[in-house]
Image (cartoon, grey):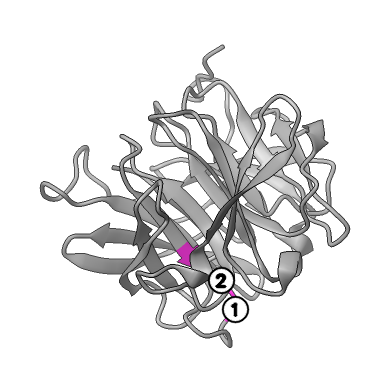
């Protein structure tokens, strides 16, 4: 089933419109949106990879934890952080925000649209374990698929070229960030790939990998770094090669603040 967002949604919050065109600025460049929580609200970052630039956009008056673009429309789906109560939001390019509703979990720190646009996946927060859930895009309600068997998955992304759902852990899994898992969409079970972004030969992630995304053709991956304003590397954006997960620094996107999620527009 395809979701159509344009009809029947009433905005209840407003943020600054996204200054984006209908195409990337130049060949070989990607355009991403990242979320930078600060206090009780979120600043959005519009990021171009080549040449690198990061522009601050005032976000909605709530704190967002995860972000994922709907595949066929420029709609950015987001979940709130721990202090938000786990709501689901949709951000539209004209600045309107639709509050879908509560997920039923205190936090859904990892979020990803299926590359087909049929399912909005989430992973629940919790230090004793995490569940794979599907979210109703209109109400926010989460349906449990199954336990991942992994503590602390903080980022999630579906690779368009393969349909494989990836999750990456933060500090709470084994004391170091960046362990890469594949997640079974039918059962929720997570399988360790053996890759660790922290130990990447291309330059490891020095702090929690809190955002994960793939380019629209699935050929390139991106990871954003969290850890608040105090952690080493907070706000950095990295590029990685799927299959090897070797990281290459792209640039500092936030000036030192945490970037809790990232998604690719172009």
Drawn side of residue 251 relative to residue 245, left or right:
left
Viewer-proximal residue among 115 and 256:
115
Quadrant housing residue 39? bottom right
Q: Residues within 10 Å of mark 1 (few under 14, many from 20)?
A: many
* Residue 188 to residue 106: above or below: above
Q: Rounded to the nearest whole Å, what is the CA distance between mark 1 and mark 2?
A: 6 Å
Q: Which mark is residue 226?
A: 2
Q: Is residue 182 magenta?
A: no
Residue at 31% across / 72% down in the picture? 251
Q: Residues within 10 Å of mark 2 (few under 14, many from 20)?
A: many
> Magenta region, mostly helix, strand or loop?
loop
Q: Is residue 227 magenta?
A: yes
> From where the camera sits, is residue 43 visible?
no
Residue at 73% across / 59% down in the picture? 152
Q: Position of residue 116 (x, y in %)?
A: 48, 22
Drawn side of residue 100 relative to residue 202, left or right:
right
* Residue carrying label 1: 228
Drawn side of residue 163 relative to residue 194, left or right:
left
* Outermost residue, top side: 1
Q: Position of residue 149 (x, y in %)?
A: 80, 47
Q: Secondary structure beneath disc 2?
A: loop
Tell me whether circle 1 and circle 2 mark residues in contact (CB < 8 Å): yes
Magenta span covers which residues? 224-228
Q: Secondary structure beneath disc 1?
A: loop
Q: Position of residue 71 (x, y in %)?
A: 42, 30
> From where the camera sits, is residue 55 visible?
yes
């Amino acid at each position: 089933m395809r979701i159509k967002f344009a009809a029947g949604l009433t905005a209840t919050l407003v943020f600054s419109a996204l200054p984006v065109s209908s195409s990337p600025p130049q060949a070989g460049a990607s355009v991403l949106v990242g979320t930078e929580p600060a206090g009780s609200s979120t600043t959005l970052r519009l990021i171009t990879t080549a040449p690198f630039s990061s522009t601050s956009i005032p976000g909605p008056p709530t704190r967002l934890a995860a972000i994922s673009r709907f595949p066929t429309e420029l709609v950015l789906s987001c979940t709130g952080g721990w202090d938000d109560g786990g709501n689901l939001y949709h951000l539209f390019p004209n600045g309107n925000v639709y509050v879908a509703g509560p997920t039923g979990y205190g936090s859904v720190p990892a979020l990803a649209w299926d590359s087909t646009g049929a399912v909005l996946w989430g992973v629940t927060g919790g230090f004793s374990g995490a569940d794979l859930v599907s979210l109703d895009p209109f109400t926010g309600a989460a349906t449990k698929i199954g336990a991942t068997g992994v503590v602390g998955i903080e980022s999630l992304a579906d690779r368009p070229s393969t349909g494989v759902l990836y999750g990456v852990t933060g500090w709470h899994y084994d004391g170091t960030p960046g362990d890469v898992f594949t997640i079974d969409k039918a059962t929720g079970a997570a399988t360790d790939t053996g890759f660790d972004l922290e130990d990447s030969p291309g330059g490891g992630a020095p702090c929690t990998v809190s955002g994960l995304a793939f380019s629209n053709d699935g050929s390139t991956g991106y990871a954003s770094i969290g850890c608040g304003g105090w952690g080493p590397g907070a706000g950095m954006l990295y590029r990685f090669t799927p299959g090897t997960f070797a990281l290459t620094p792209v640039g500092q996107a936030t000036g030192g603040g945490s970037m809790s999620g990232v998604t690719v527009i172009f």
